[in-house]
Image (spheres, rainbow, N blue to C red):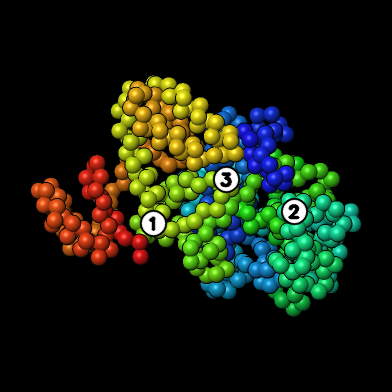
């Protein structure tokens, strides 16, 4: 498998530390609010990576963190902890907020057909490991204390600081393009290893440490947990592109300063999901779309997964409702084509040409759009025996995760008056009264119900609000 390594800025052959095995660390959610669909695009990409490696014969150990403490609202290590912010917003404890949004995250995660990580780590369960990492950095002379603030990593002591993001990007940060000023820092890019609780303040989440009562810096958790479960050097580290300049850059600095070894050999990053009117989707704006909202609007969550599969993970993805409508139709057509093959004789071998092309797409930097195209071509290739096409599509769905052979879901009930219109339209169409059929379709659309005609007859769904 060849993958694009953000660290080297080129595609490279994936060569794991242990032959035939891949240790993967993926940055998980900060559980102070719902995950938005932009976050979920990254998690879908990571899921596809794991599925693809396993499909190609690798043994995979995926570790994912849950950030339930230490992620401040500012990249400058200032401001309120997002968990405390969530608690204040909802009038609950930070611990209750963490539990609730962790559960909600995994509901979305599973609705999108993402397989559970092999190891899931909550930051609050690894405070000792983070303190031990901080003590190692202190012993090696990489840290200093800002009284009343916290223990900081001195980035000037680490010559390779910024190698992931690039020199020009780090210079931009130093000039204040991304990080606010903190007067006590020696360098603008220095970051917190441990933050002190404010004098006289009782935080909901705080722990004793050799430096004083407080809580870990955000970046510490990923290094501590990755090394705990995958070793001092890991094969592959995944995340969103927003992590490159600060979070992943700081993970590299503190990990490699502590061990003297490379932290991760391959770094992979999914690009942003953007919307035309909102730009990059962000929870800080207060306006974001969730998987649950898509479901409430009548969409199958896997229609969004299909939507993501159509664009390579290293390309920016623009979200539109029209695009999601098209993805919904595309997914249902592919499912219908797959289900039509379900009665073919069992025991057939997967179509060799398509299986070969499918594997080649996966091996080419996880080219899922091309892999999806292989599935479509096989579904339509009537020159091949149905059994071969069926066997291939079953194999392909192990990676695509679209539930291609799932039985059609029952439609939710409409109000009786609207259902009567739907039934009347079906009757008009059967009678070939297309004028009346079109009139009823328009009336239903005006009342929030979209009707579509297909090989299996008419189908309806609620119009997105």
The CA distance from mark 1 to mark 3 is 26 Å
Give the residue pinned by disc 2. Answer: 166
Q: Quadrant of residue 176?
A: bottom right
Please tell me the numbered disc located at residue 84: none
Residue 84 appearing in the image: yes
* Residue displayed at 78% across by 43% down: 262
116 relative to 328 in the view: left or right: right
448 relative to 423 in the view: left or right: right
* Residue displayed at 20% across by 63% down: 443
Give the residue pinned by disc 1. Answer: 322
The x, y position of residue 354, in whole percent, is: 46, 28
The x, y position of residue 248, in whole percent, is: 70, 53
The front one of 121 and 431 is 431
Helix, strand or loop for disc 1: helix
Give the residue pinned by disc 3. Answer: 46
Q: With respect to residue 245, does 182 lie above or below? A: below
The CA distance from mark 3 to mark 2 is 24 Å
Q: With respect to residue 153, does 387 lie above or below? A: above
Residue 136 appearing in the image: no
313 relative to 448 in the view: left or right: right
| Quadrant in which the C terminus appears | bottom left
* Residue displayed at 36% across by 39% down: 334
Which label's residue is closer to the chain start, 1 or 3?
3
């Amino acid at each position: 498998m060849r993958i694009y390594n953000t660290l080297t800025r080129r595609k490279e052959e994936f060569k794991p530390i242990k032959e035939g095995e891949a240790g993967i660390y993926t940055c998980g959610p900060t559980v102070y609010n719902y995950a938005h669909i932009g976050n979920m695009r990254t998690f879908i990409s990571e899921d596809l990576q794991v599925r693809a490696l396993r499909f190609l014969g690798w043994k995979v150990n995926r570790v994912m963190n849950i950030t339930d403490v230490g992620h401040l609202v500012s990249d400058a290590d200032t401001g309120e902890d997002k968990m405390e912010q969530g608690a204040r917003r909802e009038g609950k404890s930070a611990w209750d907020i963490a539990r609730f949004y962790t559960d909600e995250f995994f509901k979305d995660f599973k609705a999108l057909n993402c397989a559970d990580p092999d190891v899931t780590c909550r930051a609050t369960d690894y405070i000792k490991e983070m303190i031990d990492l901080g003590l190692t950095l202190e012993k090696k002379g990489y840290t200093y204390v800002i009284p009343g603030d916290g223990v900081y990593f001195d980035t000037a002591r680490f010559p390779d600081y910024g190698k992931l993001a690039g020199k020009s990007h780090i210079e931009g940060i130093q000039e204040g393009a991304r990080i606010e000023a903190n007067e006590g820092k020696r360098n603008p890019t220095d970051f917190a290893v441990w933050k002190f609780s404010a004098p006289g303040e009782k935080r909901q989440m705080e722990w004793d440490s050799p430096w004083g009562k407080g809580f870990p810096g955000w970046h510490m958790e990923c290094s501590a947990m990755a090394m705990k479960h995958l070793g001092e050097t890991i094969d592959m580290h995944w995340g969103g592109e927003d992590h490159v300049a600060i979070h992943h850059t700081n993970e590299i600095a503190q990990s490699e300063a502590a061990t003297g070894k490379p932290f991760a050999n391959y770094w992979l990053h999914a690009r942003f999901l953007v919307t035309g009117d909102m730009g990059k989707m962000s929870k800080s704006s207060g306006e974001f779309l969730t998987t649950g909202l898509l479901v409430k609007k009548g969409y199958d969550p896997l229609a969004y997964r299909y939507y993501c599969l159509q664009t390579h993970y290293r390309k920016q993805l623009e979200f539109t409702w029209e695009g999601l409508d098209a993805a919904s139709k595309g997914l249902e057509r592919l499912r219908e084509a797959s289900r039509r093959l379900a009665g073919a004789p069992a025991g057939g071998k997967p179509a060799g040409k398509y299986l070969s092309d499918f594997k080649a797409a996966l091996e080419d930097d996880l080219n899922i759009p091309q892999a999806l195209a292989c599935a479509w071509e096989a579904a339509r290739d009537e020159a091949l025996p149905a059994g071969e096409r069926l066997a291939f599509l079953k194999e392909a769905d192990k990676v695509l995760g679209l539930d291609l052979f799932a039985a059609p879901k029952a439609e939710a009930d409409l109000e009786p008056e609207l259902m009567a219109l739907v039934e009347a339209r079906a009757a008009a169409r059967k009678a070939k009264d297309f004028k009346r059929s079109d009139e009823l379709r328009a009336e239903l659309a005006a009342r929030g119900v979209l009707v579509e005609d297909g090989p299996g007859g008419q189908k309806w769904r609620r119009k997105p609000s």
